[in-house]
Amino acid sequence: MFNYVRRNTVEVNVGGITIGCTAPVRVQSMTNTSTMDTDGSVDQVLRIVAKGGELVRLTTQGNREAVNMGSIKDQLKARGCNVPLVADVHFNASVADTAARYADKVRVNPGNYVDPARTFKQLEYTDAEYADELKRLRERFVAFLDICKAEGRAVRVGVNHGSLSDRIMSRYGDTPQGVVESCMEFLRICRDEQFNNVVVSIKTSNTTMMVTTVRRLVRVMAEEGIAFPLHLGVTEAGDAEDGRIKSAVGIGALLADGIGDTVRVSLAEAPENEIPVARELVEYVALRQDAPAIDGVAAAGFNYEDPVRRKTTAFGIIGGDNLPVVVGGEVDDKDIASDIAADLVPVVSLENAKDARFIAVTYGELTPENIAKIRLLKDIVLVASSDHVNAVGELRALVHRLIIEGIDAPVIIRMAYNEPSAETLRIKASADLGVLIIDGLVDGLWIENPSSSAQELNALMFGILQATRARISKTEYIACPGCGRTMYDLQGTLARIKAATAHLKGLKIGVMGCIVNGPGEMADADYGYVGAARGKVSLYRRKECVEKNIPEDEAIYRLLQLIENDRNAGK
């Protein structure tokens, strides 16, 4: 937790590039064109590669799309591009077999590879029935692996929280344990068949669940002698500022732990827009590689896979059971006004701490003498900062030391940046602070950046808190990035839905291009807007489809009507 060390993995070869082991963290994206549109797909792949993409994934709904991957690859080669192509397969195992003959890597989803699609029904499986399903799964998956061996292909076992099978749900429920077990069933088969050209991913739109579930997976893999590389991504992250913050929080938290060998930032935008965000995030965290060592000690009882917020004694609105606060300047927009104005927080050093309430502290200052001094102070807030290259590791060590010493003063994390680019600040601050919030170590945020206005900084801090679900201050949109399966203009529709619902603070709305992961990921949303067919949309209330196949030009109005009717009815 304190020093950046990349996790050791086997080396995977995908179309001539390596993933894992000593290879750099690879950056990738996915097209949103129809895979049958050869020219359009080739052009989009070239735009992704021009931005620095190292792998590109395309959707393969059926065998004809899988076969056309070969035509796309041929055209790319003719234009001097040898980027590895990845086929994305759902619902049809035979398509994976076909894709393995044309694509460099094939992504299969354990939730729908052989098992029927998730129905959200309470199904019961006896032990014998469960074992029979696993036997059928093994036989079918081994046949696929044999093709991949013969063709020299790689495989991604990619679990989406939103598409766990009913079989897994019946035994484990909608839990991190269920997500990990869904993945491990396939990884055990790969291990037993001595097929090591495997990359693994677990994705969810909930950043905290994504981070803690991947941490669990890494432990279980290690316990079972499996060391496949990991692909990271926050699915359905959305667009614009929120999408970037959410992705940087989730991916950055795992990269900070040395977990992750390839990355995709999923934005509901043009796919090539994802690459610079992912590249900047990966390069920023990699700076910690050669940082001076931090002698941190983990507090007893800290649960890395299921952290809870540190218990503190509240000082006013800070700490205790209060939501994490935001320290900043005054702004006109009351919805993003900070809890505490910076000029009302007179921070003093430990040396002058006798009658002060806000005490500056760094990890190096936590000497036995200063620990004793802090213990004598009452009604204080510690304002923690770090100028270490690995500030995340040092701040983690600082708060763990407080826990070990039994000091329960609230902690505000104060981070100072000097970034002229709002995008760069967003990525760095989200990666730094998100993991500290997920680990339960934060009672308040204080970001400083000379070129940013108070309004911009407050919006960023509230955005980071929202992305970790530590504090909800606005509507949340769970929006997929779109792919060849998307049934409507995703970007334009998302913009219109956001404009119509931005006032609904605390509501979670899913905007999904198709049904592959839509209903599942929207189990975490209050309402969902899902592409059902060309020009048709279905509306969901949580897991339940309440209106099917609405004409697209009526769907947003009907969504608003559904929300309003539910509110009037007190639902």
Image: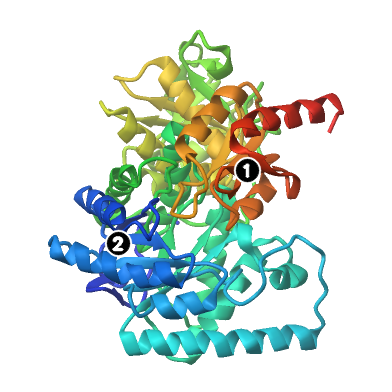
CA gap, disc 2 and disc 1? 32 Å
Q: Is residue 305 above or below residue 17?
A: above
Q: 285 and 466: which one is in front?
A: 466
Q: Residue furthest top?
A: 332
Helix or strand or loop: what does disc 1 sit on? strand
Corner quadrant of residue 110: bottom right
Q: Earlier in the sequence, mark 2 or mark 1?
A: 2
Decide if residue 404 is on the left or right side of residue 523. Answer: left
Helix or strand or loop: what does disc 2 sit on? strand
Residue at the (64%, 89%) spot, across then down: 135
Residue 564 position within the rendered picture, expressed as x and y whole percent measured from the top left: 76, 25
The residue labelled by disc 1 is 537
Count of all numbered marks drawn on residues in the image: 2
Residue 311 position within the rendered picture, expressed as x and y whole percent measured from the top left: 67, 41
Q: Label 1 crowding class (10 Å Cα cut-off): few <14, some 14-19, many 20+? A: many
Identity, as a three-letter code, of the amino acid under mark 1: Val
Q: Is residue 92 above or below residue 121?
A: below
Residue 176 position within the rendered picture, expressed as x and y whole percent measured from the top left: 64, 62
Residue at the (68%, 61%) spot, across then down: 175
Q: Label 2 crowding class (10 Å Cα cut-off): few <14, some 14-19, many 20+? A: many
The C terminus - image quarter = top right
Q: 382 and 213: which one is in front?
A: 213
Q: 114 and 256: which one is in front?
A: 114
Q: Residue furthest right?
A: 569
The residue labelled by disc 2 is 55
